[in-house]
Image: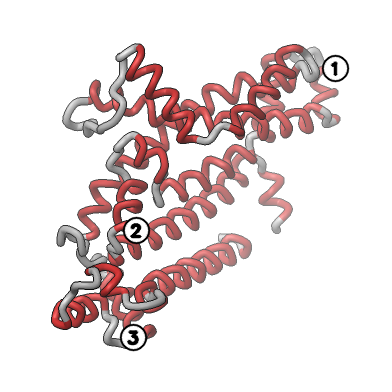
Amino acid sequence: MTRHIVLRLLRAAAAVVLVTTAAAALPHLMRGSPALAALGPNATPEQIAAFDADLGLDDNVLVAAWHWIADALHGDLGSSLANGVPVTTELGDRVPVTLELFAASQLVALAIALPVALWSAWRPGGVFDRLATALAFVWLAIPAFVLGLLLIYVAAVQWRVLPATGWTPFTDDPADNLRHLVLPALTMGLTEAAVFTRTLRAQLMDTLDQTYIDAARGRGLGSARLLLRRALRPSALPLVTLIGIGFGMALGGSVLVETLFAVPGMGSLAATAINGRDFPVIQAIVVVTAVGVVAATLAVDLLYRRIDPRIAHDHR
């Protein structure tokens, strides 16, 4: 294990500890009374006392944070204030849904971005390149919820080929699961496709200007092989970053898309928890998101070294 990786692991561990401590102290950091915010102004003194005891609000912030972290390390994240269900159970039900939605959206984005960016970079300034660039700018200006509503109107209301909202677990009915997955995945994937296309095109343009590409052209290497074998791999590093960070953030939930399509993932759970002042659930989502982002960042760093070994050499 290199010194660089050790340092990254130490920084990642420090970041997780800091975020976890802040999440554990979240009820103490709120202005006003968390008990009144969660229970309402008609709460009795007994209810407020029980609420404070459950969340450790009768301890000081450091003691409460320590107790929360100790319980979390033993797999106890508390129970939802809304329904009494253990938070770990809630997360176990919601995380797979969000990850499935994220994976499907990335497939949509890559299926669009890769061919469009490759062709645009190979023929810069052409009709296709100018059209693709203009469409990418327009697409980025469309809010995700507007795109989602348009898709619902066309596919669910006008054509009636896909359900507008709802969710079916894959294990219950794979076909119906895919039908419910299409619209939210398209909403997320089409938006990200514009970002992916612009990022990859710019990187490909830079790569195609390199000397070794000119040398490969001089040896008669075909266009397809030149693009796919010589230019795409080093140009894919920014996409790896975008996908990796997107994976970490997905664990926090795509609140807008999941709420719009009534997808029971982390996003809809976060929205419900925030509206209901469900602090145990909010704390868990913050920590899971932080761990996901840190883990994704480390994974991206390792993938960089596999994709381009020169990066590993530079850090020696």
Measuring from the top left, give residue 78's x and y in whole percent.
22, 67
Tell me which label, 3 or 2, sits earlier in the chain: 3
Residue contact at pointers 2 and 1, CB within 8 angstroms: no
- Residue 147: x and y in percent read 48, 28
Of 97 and 143, nearer the camera is 143
Pinpoint residue 263: horizontal percent, then vertical percent: 30, 38
Question: Which label sits on residue 63?
Answer: 3
Vertical arrangement, residue 41 with respect to residue 142, above or below: below
Instruction: Rate crowding at label 2 as few (under 14), some (14 to 19) or many (20 or more) other CA atoms within 10 Å.
Output: some
- Between the residue at mark 3 and the residue at mark 1, the CA separation in whole angstroms equals 69 Å
Q: At which x and y percent is residue 27?
A: 35, 74
Q: Residues within 10 Å of mark 1 (few under 14, many from 20)?
A: few
Which residue is tagged 1?
218
Q: What residue is drawn where x is 24% and y is 69%?
A: 40
**Foreground tag (3 vs 2):** 2
Q: Amino acid at mark 2?
A: Ile
**Image quadrant in which the C terminus is located:** bottom right
Task: Determine which residue is flagged by label 2.
Answer: 274
Give SS at disc 1: helix
- The answer to which of marks 2 and 1 sits earlier in the sequence is 1
For badge 3, the amino acid type reads: Val
> Which is more foreground, mark 2 or mark 1?
2
Secondary element type, mark 3: helix
Q: Is residue 128 placed above or below 303 in the rendered structure?
A: above
Is there CB contact under 8 Å for labels 3 and 2? no
Q: At label 1, which amino acid type do we have? A: Gly
Task: Kindly identify the residue that appears in the image at 77 percent across and 28 percent down.
Answer: 205
Farthest front residue in view: 42
In terms of image quadrants, where is residue 31? bottom left
